Image (cartoon, rainbow, N blue to C red):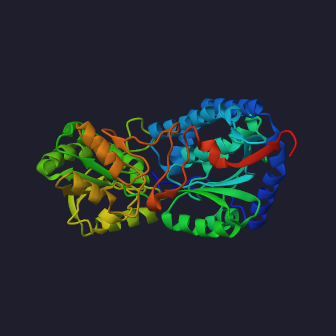
Amino acid sequence: MIDPATGAVFTSVPSLDLAATDAAVERAAKAFPAWRAVAPGDRARLLRRFAALVDQHVDELAELEVRNAGHTIGNARWEAGNVRDVLDYYAGAPERLTGRQIPVPGGIDVTFHEPLGVVGIIVPWNFPMPIAGWGFAPALAAGNTVVLKPAELTPLTAIRLGELAVEAGIPRDVFQVLPGPGRVVGQRFVTHPAVRKICFTGSTGVGKSIMAGAADQVKRVTLELGGKSANIVFADADLERAAASAPASVFDNAGQDCCARSRLLVQESVYDKFLGLLEPAVKGFRVEDPALATAEMGPLISAGHRASVASYVEGSDVAFTGRAPEGDGWWFPPTVLLARSADDRHWREEVFGPVLSVLPFRDEEDAVRLANDTEYGLSGSLWTRDLGRALRVSRAVETGALSVNSHSSVRYWTPFGGMKQSGLGRELGPDALLSFTDVKNVFMAMGDQ
């Protein structure tokens, strides 16, 4: 494993081969009947115990993520705490996974939510802890067993979470972490008949491949894929607040966030004024050693990814940049680019780095048109003091999660998922367990039939 802040190797993790992956899936399948039979209240107690252990190890997990993924220590502590909170939240769900009684002639009709079996969760490198928790917590709560494949670049916190699960009393074969390459471990989740559902977060290209492969077995999939989200600023907005918020909305986690608001749309009449407010906010964004409590942004994940991000900046109109450390590590400064048109590569493609593209718009209709002119539809923000406009534009923008006068739109207690090529299915929120179950309908005749 390589520390992104220094470029130095600091540990290694063995990768599973096909035989080891098959053996793990088969163990999960054998463990399923017993786990399914655990009383809902007992499953809830195990999940609460798991959450308590994560809470006790928040600092350890955070420090591991700083080296594992280059996250700032502040973000990493939040991410470990998010795993704890998600486990606590879904610990309340097993006893509430109720069916319905439906009036029918001649008897009674009831529905049950039955667990699927083995759930395969494929986690990306950009948010290794939260995205893992968003999958395994509701899957386990619903009575499924889980095989989880962390990203090859960032497996360490997932492995540690797997150890804490066992320590909490969750049977070893019920929740297994399988480090290894996607072409081996992840692909086997797609083809293995015992894996009944796949939760994948990652690139749209890989998501399409998984969806196509899953069709062969009519296997369930939840896909949370790429994004190119818009941040729309209307002239009547609180411009100072919107400009202060904009850097965090795109540079958090060094822009390696599918929800990053990487397209900034500003109404023409306040375009120059807003850029004047944005510049000091960008230049003041603290990019430094991620272990420092003051760090707001750390390095990119790898040298190869840094080269990819740089390719979008070369030859583009750079408005201004922030600062970043020099020397070892995969550092890149926060960068603001002026789009010549909506056809610019940096405006249309997912850069997945600390690069913000800016384009002016005329009016509400023009803003909606430009925001929707993309194959993606994951997240976004809009800024206005006009309540009617906020509601109209929120309904008109084709995206799965949107915030008004804020850059935060993902919460574990509300639904999360994408539109268009940003995803398929909804995770999180009070109904998440339903996506990890099959609905069984039972008619019971009463009287002579």
Task: Using the image as rendered, state which of residue 370 and residue 6 is in the foreground.
Answer: 370
User: Among all residues in the image, which is located at the extreme front?
Assistant: 448
User: Among all residues in the image, which is located at the extreme right?
Assistant: 448
Task: Using the image as rendered, state which of residue 368 and residue 409 is in the foreground.
Answer: 368
- Residue 413 drawn at (x, y percent): 52, 36
Query: Is residue 216 shown to the viewer in this render?
Result: yes
Q: Residue at x 36, y 65 (%)?
A: 349
Q: Residue at x 71, y 61 (%)?
A: 16
Left or right relative to 55: residue 315:
left
Task: Using the image as rendered, state which of residue 63 and residue 246 is in the foreground.
Answer: 246
Q: Residue at x 50, y 62 (%)?
A: 203
Picture quadrant of residue 192: bottom right
Query: Is residue 175 shown to the viewer in this render?
Result: no
- Residue 237 drawn at (x, y percent): 21, 39
Picture quadrant of residue 96: top right
Q: How many marks?
A: 0
Q: Is residue 336 above or below residue 112?
A: below
- Residue 374 drawn at (x, y percent): 35, 63
For the N terminus, the image quarter is bottom right
Left or right relative to 183: residue 67:
left
Q: Residue at x 40, y 50 (%)?
A: 379
- Residue 238 drawn at (x, y percent): 21, 37
